[in-house]
Image (cartoon, rainbow, N blue to C red):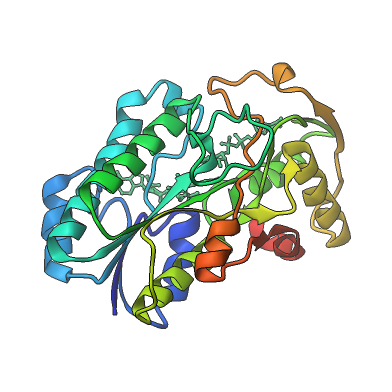
Amino acid sequence: MKVLITGCNGQVGSCLTERLIAEAEVLALDSKRLDITDREAVFSIVSEFKPNYIINAAAYTAVDRAEQEIELSYAVNRNGPLNLAQVAKEIGAVLLHISTDYVFDGDGGNPYKESDKTGPKSVYGQSKLAGERAIAEACPKYLILRTAWVFGEHGTNFVKTMLRVAESRDELSIVGDQFGGPTYAGDVAGALITMIQHVEQGKDTKWGVYHFSGMPYASWFGFASAIFTAAEQQQVLAKIPTLSSIPTSAYPTPAKRPANSRLDCFKIEKQFGIKPSDWLTALNNIQAYK
Ligand SMILES: NC(=O)C1=CN([C@@H]2O[C@H](COP(=O)(O)OP(=O)(O)OC[C@H]3O[C@@H](n4cnc5c(N)ncnc54)[C@H](OP(=O)(O)O)[C@@H]3O)[C@@H](O)[C@H]2O)C=CC1
Ligand SMILES: Cc1cn([C@H]2C[C@H](O)[C@@H](COP(=O)(O)OP(=O)(O)O[C@H]3O[C@@H](C)C(=O)[C@@H](O)[C@H]3O)O2)c(=O)[nH]c1=O
């Protein structure tokens, strides 16, 4: 089995590469070795390696900066996936792609199902949705994993930000009215690998979009509280800051974020037996995210 991974130095890309190397012939490419917006390079490298699976872990993920860098955001999050989808179709490969909870407006009261109406409020979310649509139109064999609030050992994320700012601040104000499912990057990699194994074993696979995130749901304030509880128990910080829960209106940001980011993860469990990410357990090793 041959697997090509793009964006191999990102949070998810790093975990994927570490885990897949033991069980497949892996070509893991960072942005320097393969810029997914470069159509010619994509076709040349992919056609030469001829993977059975392409996993696109590359993306433009700077949510606030995307409001300014609209063109770049669409180039990476729509045109890049389109290139990969077209080459996947040409060589008969399966394309696995990662998308986001930010494709929803977050105004609904329930966890979002795959069939629910999208309505991204940010350029990042809009460009990711455009990427999903480009894939669905261009490639018959695709699996899109929508996930949320990812944290892990590699790259930048909310856990690392909290641990960093705690070193210089005694008090932190954290938004308490946006809710989602924090998700461990290693579990996102695990979910994608389980999906590949399912296809590899010849089991019936319904191509399309799947939701995968962590349980229990939390607000960013709740997530931060859990991070500092873990940090205190594991003695990784010299001092623990005092936290206060604030409304979104008290923390203005360039990009609008959904108030309800909760993903309903029933479909992926039913089809692939994949259970939600146990993010609280992943915080048991909080030193790893410093
Ligand atoms: N982080 C999160 O909370 C969430 C992420 N997701 C999605 O999960 C996926 C993985 O996210 P995550 O691992 O956190 O992202 P990261 O930002 O950690 O990693 C993304 C990687 O993509 C690379 N990249 C950027 N532009 C290009 C390009 N043009 N060609 C090739 N590679 C490029 C980056 O490389 P370089 O640094 O060299 O630019 C980086 O290594 C993305 O699709 C993201 O949208 C979904 C929900 C939540
Ligand atoms: C640092 C900080 C953030 N916040 C708020 C701002 C925001 O509403 C929320 C999270 O902020 P961040 O900018 O860290 O996270 P953000 O970049 O919005 O994270 C998103 O990234 C993309 C890639 C995704 O796909 C999403 O699923 C999601 O994980 O926390 C505070 O309230 N206080 C703080 O001190």
Residue 69 drawn at (x, y percent): 37, 25
Q: Tell how many labels.
A: 0
Residue 150 vertical position relative to residue 78 in the rendered view, above or below:
below
- Quadrant of the frame with the N terminus: bottom left
- Could you tell me which residue is drawn at 87 percent across and 46 percent down? 239
- Could you tell me which residue is drawn at 23 percent across and 66 percent down? 93
Depth order, front residue of 196/207: 207
In this image, 115 relative to 128: left or right? right
Residue 188 drawn at (x, y percent): 53, 60
Residue 114 vertical position relative to residue 27 in the rendered view, above or below:
above
- Quadrant of the frame with the C terminus: bottom right
Q: Is residue 290 visible?
A: no
- Could you tell me which residue is drawn at 70 percent across and 58 percent down? 279
Residue 179 drawn at (x, y percent): 70, 38
Residue 26 vertical position relative to residue 228 in the rendered view, above or below:
below
Q: Is residue 225 visible?
A: yes
